[in-house]
Amino acid sequence: MASVAVHFIFRIDNYPHLLRAYGAEVARSALAELYQIFADSIRDDGLVTTESDGRLEVLLWNHTLLGEQPLAKACDNWIHSFCSAIAMVPLDCSGERLLLSVSGAWAGADLGKHDEPGAPASSALHALERIRFPGDAPGHGEAWKEHYRADMEAAAELFGAIEADESTDASISIEASIRFSPARHDSREVALAWQPVSGVGGAVGILYHECLIRLISSDGKSHPPGGLPEALERLGLVRALDHYVIKAVIAELEQQPDVTLGVNISAHSTRFDGWWQDIAQRLARNRRVAQRLVIEITETTPIPSISEATTFASRMRSLGCMIAIDDFGTGFASIRQLLALKPDIAKIDRLFVARAARSVQDRTAFMHLVGLANALVPLVIVEGIENDDQCQLALEAGAQWQQGYHHGDPGLTRRWRWGAESTGFSGSLNELLTNASVVGWSS
């Protein structure tokens, strides 16, 4: 009986960027590091070769190493696991700490038949070419080089502060044989903070807690990540961070059946593909967890594809998740996005409530913006509430759900674990949305 070999092609998506920002020696070193990872894991069960454009070809003839799943699913899962994990592991490449954005595709070949030469490789290559790199295109000039290298240094510091077993899910391998053990270079650690969305007026209690990334310095103090999410978007690596955080939030929801949590994702992550497959499968197995998860889409960059984002929002809502548009009214978050994505929640950017106290015109604009959002989505939250005056102003505008330091700082303590905080309304957030006074979107 003929045996089936699997032909994988992996591509370092940011290889052109590394060439321009660091030079050929560093870029080739990155390719060599990736080659060694594959070679060490496959050994005599396959063959690994490299191409000068940043591609690697892996021919695996002992495909039982992929596990007991059906071949197609096993190959897809391995590609996704490897690509998502390697993006979070800083590699030492000729003295530079680099993060690699890697994509992969595969095709099968029957070793007992005389297929057309190169047919499996061609098929895998065509599949790979359809995968879009989410980061910025490589630029030119010294200013671009400096900016890119600064972004990469900050990103490597961020992911280097995450424990190796957390960033790689302990293993990302064929038969759990690939294990990364990168040395920790950083004194800082990454932690998750939680800020409540609270009710005022007729709304009572805490609607949900939003998860926020924080960096813990050597003195034990926590700090916001600053411009790191935007740097990761430019580097094409933000999906790795989103994937890491949302899995941590889901784990918390699985342990705490009475809490509802929200998590931010980049506009770059609003595409339902391999990055979301394991998450969707996990949520499908436990719809009660999905029904307590709010996915907040933050548009610091434009959504790459409205049609793909619409499909993504629909798929996640079909699992039971709630979708929120963050920072509404600024940046790229617009009425068009509300109409297309049909979110459950709109969060008014903090800018508007802060400006509302400056002039009658700004106050009027804020009131109208909240009114517009209330007309378009089932539930509206005003962000950036810092004092009682802003709280009352937002309430007057029609926003009974608010978020900001007036209602609670982002804290590292999960207060709900000890019953210190809980929802103060009857039923779940899903039920609240269903019973909202405005007409919600139809699924």
Image (spheres, rainbow, N blue to C red):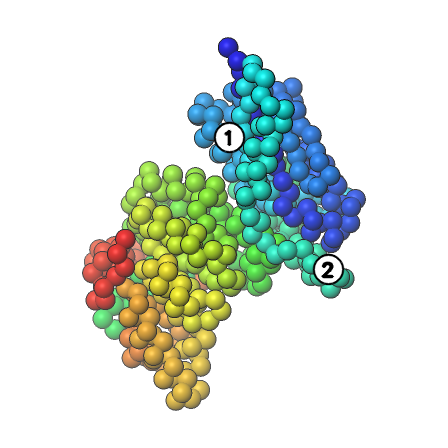
Whole-percent x, y for residue 295 in the image: 39, 55
In the picture shown, does residue 129 fall above or below 138?
A: above
Q: Is residue 17 left or right of residue 360?
A: right
Direction from residue 181 to residue 286 in the image, left or right: left
Label 2 CA crowd tier, 10 Å (few <14, some 14–19, many 20+): few
**Which of the 4 image quadrants contains residue 284?**
top left
Residue 82 pos. (x, y %): 56, 37
First reached walking from the N terminus: tag 1 or tag 2? 1
Question: Disc 2 on helix, strand or loop?
Answer: loop
Picture residue at 29% right of the left edge, 45% below the top:
288
Indicate the amino acid at tag 1: Cys
- Residue 148: mark: none
Q: Relative to the observer, which residue lies in front, 75 or 432?
A: 75
Is residue 190 visible in this depiction of the protein? no
Q: Does residue 287 sit above or below 322 in this rendering? A: above
How many marks the image carries: the answer is: 2
- Identified at 54% across, 43% down, the residue is 130
Q: CA distance from mark 1 to mark 2?
A: 37 Å
Displayed quadrant of residue 307: bottom left
- Determine the residue positioned at 46% across, 71% down: 330
**Outermost residue toward the bottom in this view:** 360
Residue occupying the point 73% across, 64% down: 143
The residue carrying mark 2 is 140
Q: Is residue 443 left or right of residue 329?
A: left
Label 1, on which residue? Answer: 75
- Which of discs 1 and 2 lies nearer the camera? The answer is 2
Q: Amino acid at mark 2?
A: His
Can you say whether 168 is above or below 189 in the image?
A: above
